[in-house]
Image (spheres, rainbow, N blue to C red):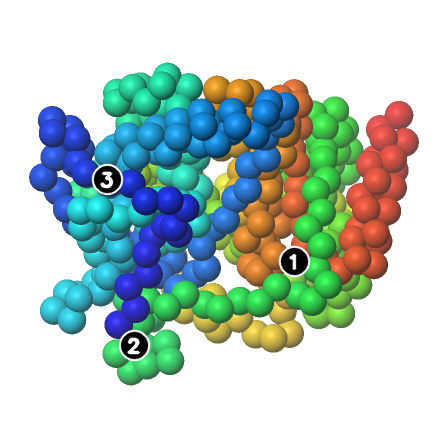
Amino acid sequence: MAKPSLVKVLDVCKVAPMPHSPNSATQTSLPLTFFDVFWLRFPPNQHLFFYEFPNPKATLTETILPKLKHSLCVTFQHYLPLAGNLMWPPDADKPIIQYSKGFAIGYAAHHAVFDGKSIALFMHSWASMCRRGGNSTLALELTPFYDRTIVNDPTNIEQAYLNCWVAHNGPNNRSLEIWDLKAPLDAILGTFQLTQANIQCIKKWVTVKWQEKQAFHSSNFAVTSAYTWVCLIKTLKLTTEKVQLGVNIDCRSRLKPPIPSTYFGNCVTGCIVYADTSKLMEEDGVAIAARAIGEAIGGLDDGVLKGAEDLISNLLSIQKDVSLFSITGSPRFESYNTDFGWGRPKKVEIVSIEKSGAFSLSDSRDGNGGVEIGVVLKKHETEAFASMFISGLECHQVHEN
């Protein structure tokens, strides 16, 4: 039975619970919730943080790396599940996260253990520890909340997910081996930016378009995702009749009662946005896409987990004549605020999109409210996307004026 480690080896350090930590003094295992079970076989999330470091190499090897290692070991005392293994014991109904004294450190996040918000919480905690010289205390807003009993499952979503996984390539398939997705040949990871002014311009254009028919207020997320989605569809010249966009929604504040923002683990659900490919290729495609995204998310107001028990079965049964896109990351994670003591990152990349096929969203490095968008395409497709992306912004600017 596969026992995937939750972290990849960077270096070795001893990780043990803090003697008086209320989070981890005695607990050595953590149960999964249905939010976690959903992601059991999905590939890990992988981020790269690039920093400018105009100092001698000796400073890096003799000062910075030891400081990083020490602060990471201290941070892990608050995040013990990340020093464990994801296991599905033969006598257990579902997988668990099992900590054993002395695991290794690194960063390739298995999505069954934590979502993007928890990943960001961990990275900001590590950076804070490093800036403060390895002080073992964490600020309240960075302290992870582990109580899984706070997550209610009245419709038994967890069992529906477990049934899907054990039946997929089954019967009784308890494998925890992740899907081995391959990156396209000659793929290029490109980063594009929408400034705050760009986003507001597109929002105004979308609003004007819908005022002609039916009033619609679009969010920054809806127009950013819609613009990227439409540019991709046009670039790839899709011939499928239908297109879908998978959107992850943070449930922490949407659950009744809401759970703490520092809840550690997964607390996201998904919704699928459906559209006609031909409609999104029309002149008003971005406005149509923005409304479809906004209405799909708005539909969750009637119950954020309504229909959630069917998410895995729907995912596994997607027809080949439908093109599925998805989104990873969020500007709300503030990746560019991950400062270890020598300044903000110069670049942050979600490199796992080369295999997942998703496009990524993150905050902008200039900190002015813009959004960075990562896409993976072949070289000629990247050039076509860049042309489409830029010309579309110019078009929306002209229409607004």
Instruction: Identify the residue under disc 3.
Output: 15
Would residue 209 be found to the left or right of residue 115 on screen?
A: right
The first of marks 3 and 2 along the sequence is 3
Instruction: Identify the residue under disc 1.
Output: 275
Say if mark 2 contacts mark 1, CB within 8 Å: no
The amino acid at mark 3 is Val
Spatial CA distance of label 2 from label 1 is 34 Å
Looking at the figure, which quarter contains the N terminus? bottom left
Any part of residue 61 in sight: yes
* Residue found at the very far bottom of the displayed protein: 171
Above or below, 281 against 362 in this view is: below
Q: Secondary structure at mark 2?
A: loop
Instruction: Identify the residue under disc 2.
Output: 173
Would residue 248 be found to the left or right of residue 27 on screen?
A: right
Rendered location of residue 14, percent (x, y): 24, 40
Spatial CA distance of label 3 from label 2 is 32 Å
Looking at the picture, tell me which residue is in the foreground, 357 or 34: 357
Rendered location of residue 164, percent (x, y): 33, 71
The first of marks 2 and 1 along the sequence is 2
Q: Secondary structure at mark 3?
A: loop
Looking at the figure, which quarter contains the C terminus? top right
Residue in the picture at 66% in, 41% down? 373
Residue in the picture at 26% in, 20% down? 137
The amino acid at mark 1 is Ala
Q: Secondary structure at mark 1?
A: strand
Residue in the picture at 63% in, 34% down? 347
